[in-house]
Image (cartoon, rainbow, N blue to C red):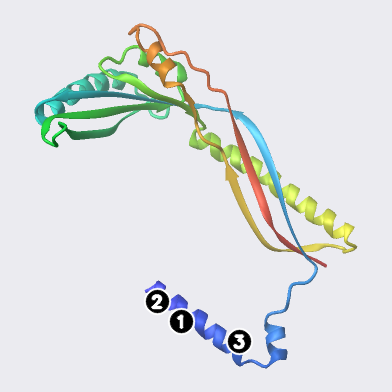
């Protein structure tokens, strides 16, 4: 219903504006004067506190049911071990992607099936997750990445956004004075933040470190750069 109402409102508004005398149109839509556009940013580096490890395995067989059975057996064993370390917010365990597809010969005839499955372990307890990687059997480490937890990201974004807004206001005040005006009024403003992408650990290194079932995966969290940008326009007055 809303999609049908909006075009009608815009058309009526345009028609009303066309019907107004030139003087009335000028009063209704005054051209912007003494308006300046500007932006300000603030950034902060923080320690990443959220580790994600994705385990995976692939199986092949002549029958699809056999592939499913093998994947289920491997996933059940990995889940049983991972659940021993599970703690809300500290070590979280969930199943990941599951795929099953036919395998074809050069003549386009199905001669078997192949499939894959994933197990995802993530959380703040980096030491516990690292130790767990040495105990999970039947699945190999496919991906490892560090990022910011939701709580850490929200706290940092609030702080860096406040700093960016303060810088925007300072720039607006400074530019207004430099142009000979006493102050300013904000016309429009937008605020955005960017954390960047999680840092992956090289796949080859991760698989090598998981070769020994007794060794923990050595990992280094590193830092994340969180940036907030405030942009818009102000009316100098």
- What SS does tag 3 mark? helix
Pointer 2 local density, CA inside 10 Å: few below 14, some 14–19, many at least 20: few
Pointer 1 local density, CA inside 10 Å: few below 14, some 14–19, many at least 20: few
Disc ID at residue 8 = 1
Q: Quadrant of residue 53?
A: top left
What separation in Å lies between label 1 and label 3 (alpha carbons)?
14 Å
| Image position, residue 83 (x, y; %) | 29, 22
Q: Quadrant of residue 100?
A: top left
Q: Which residue is mark 2?
A: 4
Residue in view at x 60 percent, y 41 percent: 157
| Image position, residue 64 (x, y; %) | 11, 31
Decide: marks 2, 1 in contact (CB < 8 A)? yes
What separation in Å lies between label 3 and label 2 (alpha carbons)?
21 Å
**Residue 77 seen in this snapshot:** yes
Q: Which residue is mark 3?
A: 17
First along the sequence among labels 3 and 2: 2
What separation in Å lies between label 2 and label 1 (alpha carbons)?
7 Å
The answer to whether 208 appears left or right of 24 in the picture is left
**Residue 128 seen in this snapshot:** no
Decide: marks 3, 2 in contact (CB < 8 A)? no
The answer to whether 74 appears left or right of 203 in the picture is left
The answer to whether 139 appears left or right of 155 in the picture is left
Residue in view at x 49 percent, y 33 percent: 149
| Image position, residue 14 (x, y; %) | 56, 84
- What SS does tag 1 mark? helix
Disc ID at residue 53 = none
Pointer 3 local density, CA inside 10 Å: few below 14, some 14–19, many at least 20: some
Residue in view at x 31 percent, y 20 percent: 82
Q: In the rendered view, would you say 43 is above or below 85?
A: below
| Image position, residue 179 (x, y; %) | 88, 61
Task: Locate the N terminus and report the quarter of the image it occupies.
Answer: bottom left
Task: Locate the C terminus and report the quarter of the image it occupies.
Answer: bottom right
């Amino acid at each position: 219903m809303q999609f049908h109402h909006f075009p009608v409102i815009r058309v009526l508004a345009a028609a009303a504006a066309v019907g107004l005398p030139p003087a009335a149109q000028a009063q209704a839509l005054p051209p912007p004067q003494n308006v300046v556009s500007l932006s300000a940013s603030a950034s902060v580096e923080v320690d990443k506190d959220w580790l994600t490890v994705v385990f995976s395995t692939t199986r092949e067989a002549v029958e699809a049911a056999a592939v499913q059975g093998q994947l289920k057996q491997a996933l059940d064993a990995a889940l049983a071990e991972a659940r021993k370390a599970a703690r809300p917010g500290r070590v979280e365990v969930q199943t990941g992607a599951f795929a099953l597809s036919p395998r074809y010969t050069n003549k386009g005839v199905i001669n078997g099936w192949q499939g894959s499955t994933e197990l995802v372990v993530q959380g703040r307890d980096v030491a516990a997750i690292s130790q767990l990687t040495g105990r999970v059997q039947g699945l190999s480490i496919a991906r490892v990445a560090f990022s910011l937890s939701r709580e850490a990201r929200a706290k940092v974004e609030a702080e860096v956004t406040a700093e960016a807004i303060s810088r925007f206001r300072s720039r607006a005040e400074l530019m207004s004075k430099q142009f000979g005006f006493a102050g300013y009024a904000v016309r429009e403003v937008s605020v955005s933040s960017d954390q960047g992408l999680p840092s992956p650990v090289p796949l080859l290194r991760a698989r090598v470190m998981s070769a020994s079932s007794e060794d923990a995966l050595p990992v280094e969290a590193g830092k994340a750069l969180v940036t907030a940008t405030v942009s818009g326009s102000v009316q100098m007055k």
